[in-house]
C-alpha cells in the first residue's frame, strides 16, 4: 500500500530529499516502502543492533534516496533528528537546532551561540532519556559546516567524548555534497579520523529497480523500451522519477519535466552542481567540454578546451567528478596511463546538455516533436552505451562470467601503413571485457527499435577491426563478438560472427 500526501504549491518531501528542500520544492510526497537497497538496509540494522556506539555516514548525490533510507529503516522514530539548511548563516542553523532540541526535550535553554554548546545541550538531553540506546539522525551535515563555524571540531568532540558505558549512541549522518562527505568527513585527518564505523554509498537505481519503482510506487505502466528511454534521461534518480505524472504519456512527461515554462527540472543542472561542489563553475566547464566528444578527452585536451591550468586544481576536479559518478576515467587497452581518457557518463547531465541547457528549445512540446531527429538518435545511441557501462554486472551475468576476473576497457586506433606496405584503417571499440580465462569480449552496443541486422558490409567491418585489434595490441587471447542490443540480433547468414548476445531484458536483472 502506498500513501500520498495532499499536493501543495511549495513543498515536497520525496524519496531521498532532505527536509531543508521544503523551502524550494513544489509538492509533497510520502512513501511507505523501500525499493531495493537490501544490503544498505542490512548494514543500517546491523549497526543499530551492535553492542557498541556507531557513527554511520550515508552519502550519494542529491535525490538518490539517502534521507528516505534512514527514515524508512527507523520509521522516522529518532531520539533526535536535525536537517541542515542550504545557504543560511551559522546563527540561523543554530537557532533551528535549538528549536528542534526544545521541541524534543521541552526544556528551555539559553540561546545557543556555537556548535560546541549545541552538542553539549544535545548530549545532556540524550543522556536524560536514560535509554540503553539512543538514535540520532543528522541530515545534510555539509550545510551545517558554514564558514568559520567550527562545526567539524565540535562534532568530533561530541562523538569522541560520548560516554558509551552509560548509553550506546547510534549516530547516522547524511550528505548530498559528496566531495565534502568524502574529503572532510569520511576522509578527515583530524578528530573524526578512524572514528566512522560504517560508510554507505547510495547509488542510483539500476534498470530493474527503476521498473519496480514505476510499477509499485508510481503505478505507471511502461514497456521496457520506454523505461530504458526514461532511464537514459533521468538516470535512475528516485527524486526525478517521483515527479512523473501517471496521467501523461512518456513523451509528455519529459516535456512537462524539462521544456514547459517553469518546468521542475529546467534549472536542476545548475542546482545539482552548486549542491555538490563549493566552486561549481570549473566543474561545469569540464563536464560541458566532455559532452562535446563521445569517446572522451585526454587531460591535455580538457586543459585546451576549458583553459583550466594543468595542476592540482584540475586533478581535484577530475577526481571529484569521478567520485560523484559524473565521469569515468579509463585507460584504453594497450595505452599508457598518461593517455587515459575521461568520459561523461552521467545520464541526466548528458540529456540536459544535449537538449535543455541555455534554452536550446523554446518549444514546450520539444520532446514530443523530435521523435525521429538525427540529434535525438545520436544522443540515444551514446546514452545507451553509458547505460550498458552502468550495468556491467548484468552483462557479465548473461555471459555467465560473473566469477571470472576481468577488466573493462575501451579501445581505438588511428589508421596506419604497415612495414610491408599494408594499409590499415582506424577503428574503435566502445566496450571490451578482458577476461582472465584468455578471452576478450568485443562488445557491439546497438540501440534500435527492432532487431539489429548484421549486413555483409557490417560483418566485413567487424572482421577487419578484429584483425586490426590483434595487430595493434598483439594479444594472444581469443576474441569473441558480443552484441548488446535492445531487441536482439536478427538471425541471418551473417549473424554467425556473433558468439553471444545481451538484450535489453537482460539489463533489467536486479
Image (cartoon, rainbow, N blue to C red):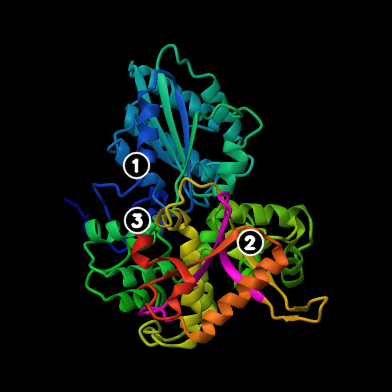
Query: Relative to 245, is 413 on the left or the right?
Result: right
Q: Residue at x 77, y 78 (%)?
A: 416
Judge whether 453 appears above or below 408 on screen. below
Q: Position of residue 452 (x, y in %)?
A: 41, 79
Task: Read off the residue under disc 1.
Answer: 38
Task: Read off the residue under disc 3.
Answer: 509
Task: Read off the residue under disc 2.
Answer: 283
Q: Position of residue 281 (x, y in %)?
A: 64, 63
**Which element is circle 2 on?**
helix
Query: Relative to 83, is 275 on the left or the right?
Result: right
Q: CA distance from mark 1 to mark 3?
A: 15 Å
**Which element is circle 1 on?**
helix
**For the residue carrying disc 2, how many other residues have a C-alpha within 10 Å: few (<14), some (14-19), or many (20+)?**
many
Q: Nearer the viewer, residue 51 or 356?
A: 51
Q: Residue at x 54, y 32 (%)?
A: 115
Which numbered marker is on residue 165? Answer: none
Q: CA distance from mark 2 to mark 3?
A: 33 Å
Q: Looking at the image, do the residues carrying marks 1 and 3 touch, with CB atoms under 8 Å apart?
A: no
Residue that sits furthest to the right in the current view: 419
First in residue order: circle 1 vs circle 2: 1
Magenta stretch bounds: 427-453
Q: CA distance from mark 1 to mark 2?
A: 33 Å
Query: Relative to 275, is 222 on the left or the right?
Result: left
Judge whether 458 appears above or below 257 on screen. below
Judge whether 494 appears above or below 7 on screen. below
**Which element is circle 3 on?**
loop
Q: Position of residue 251 (x, y in %)?
A: 33, 78
Magenta residue check for 4: no
**For the residue carrying disc 1, how many other residues have a C-alpha within 10 Å: few (<14), some (14-19), or many (20+)?**
few
Amino acid at each position: 500500500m502506498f500513501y500520498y500526501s495532499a499536493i501543495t504549491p511549495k513543498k515536497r518531501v520525496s524519496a531521498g530529499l532532505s527536509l531543508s528542500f521544503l523551502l524550494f520544492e513544489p509538492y509533497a510526497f510520502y512513501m511507505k516502502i523501500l525499493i531495493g537497497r537490501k544490503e544498505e538496509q542490512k548494514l543500517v540494522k546491523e549497526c543499530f543492533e551492535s553492542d557498541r556506539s556507531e557513527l554511520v555516514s550515508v552519502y550519494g548525490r542529491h535525490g538518490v534516496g539517502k534521507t528516505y533510507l534512514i527514515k524508512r529503516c527507523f520509521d522516522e522514530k529518532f531520539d533526535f533528528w536535525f536537517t541542515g539548511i542550504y545557504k543560511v548563516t551559522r546563527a540561523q542553523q543554530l537557532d533551528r537546532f535549538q528549536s528542534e532540541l526544545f521541541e524534543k526535550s521541552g526544556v528551555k535553554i539559553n540561546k545557543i551561540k556555537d556548535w560546541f554548546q549545541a552538542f553539549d545541550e544535545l548530549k545532556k538531553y540524550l543522556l536524560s532519556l536514560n535509554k540503553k540506546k539512543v538514535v540520532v539522525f543528522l541530515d545534510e551535515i555539509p550545510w551545517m559546516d558554514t564558514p568559520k563555524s567550527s562545526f567539524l571540531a565540535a562534532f568530533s568532540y561530541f562523538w569522541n567524548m560520548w560516554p558509551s558505558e552509560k548509553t550506546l549512541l547510534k549516530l547516522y549522518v547524511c550528505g548530498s555534497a559528496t566531495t565534502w562527505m568524502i574529503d572532510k568527513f569520511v576522509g578527515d585527518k583530524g578528530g573524526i579520523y578512524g572514528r566512522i564505523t560504517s560508510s554507505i554509498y547510495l547509488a542510483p537505481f539500476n534498470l530493474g529497480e527503476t521498473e519496480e519503482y514505476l510499477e509499485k510506487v508510481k503505478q505507471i505502466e511502461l514497456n521496457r523500451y520506454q523505461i530504458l528511454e526514461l532511464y537514459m534521461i533521468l538516470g535512475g534518480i528516485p527524486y526525478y522519477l517521483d515527479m512523473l505524472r501517471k496521467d501523461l504519456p512518456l513523451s509528455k512527461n519529459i516535456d512537462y519535466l524539462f521544456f514547459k515554462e517553469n518546468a521542475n527540472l529546467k534549472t536542476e543542472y545548475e542546482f545539482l552542481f552548486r549542491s555538490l561542489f563549493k566552486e561549481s563553475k570549473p566543474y561545469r566547464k569540464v563536464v560541458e567540454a566532455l559532452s562535446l566528444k563521445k569517446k572522451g578527452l585526454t587531460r591535455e585536451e580538457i586543459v585546451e578546451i576549458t583553459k583550466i591550468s594543468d595542476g592540482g586544481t584540475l586533478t581535484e576536479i577530475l577526481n571529484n567528478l569521478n567520485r560523484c559518478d559524473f565521469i569515468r576515467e579509463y585507460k584504453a587497452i594497450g595505452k599508457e596511463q598518461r593517455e587515459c581518457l575521461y568520459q561523461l557518463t552521467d545520464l541526466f547531465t548528458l540529456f540536459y546538455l544535449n537538449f535543455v541547457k541555455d534554452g536550446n528549445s523554446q518549444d514546450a512540446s520539444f520532446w514530443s516533436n523530435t521523435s525521429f531527429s538525427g540529434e535525438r538518435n545520436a544522443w540515444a545511441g551514446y546514452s545507451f552505451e553509458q547505460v550498458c557501462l552502468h550495468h556491467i554486472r548484468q552483462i557479465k551475468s548473461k555471459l555467465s562470467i560473473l566469477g571470472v576476473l576481468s577488466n573493462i576497457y575501451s579501445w581505438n586506433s588511428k589508421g596506419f601503413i604497415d612495414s610491408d606496405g599494408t594499409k590499415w584503417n582506424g577503428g574503435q571499440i566502445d566496450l571490451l571485457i578482458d577476461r582472465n580465462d584468455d578471452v576478450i569480449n568485443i562488445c557491439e552496443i546497438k540501440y534500435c527499435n527492432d532487431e539489429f541486422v548484421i549486413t555483409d558490409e557490417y560483418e566485413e567491418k567487424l572482421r577487419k577491426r578484429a584483425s586490426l585489434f590483434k595487430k595493434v595490441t598483439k594479444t594472444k587471447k581469443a576474441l569473441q563478438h558480443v552484441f548488446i542490443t535492445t531487441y536482439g540480433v536478427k538471425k541471418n547468414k551473417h549473424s554467425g560472427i556473433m558468439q553471444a548476445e545481451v538484450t535489453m531484458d537482460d539489463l533489467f536483472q536486479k
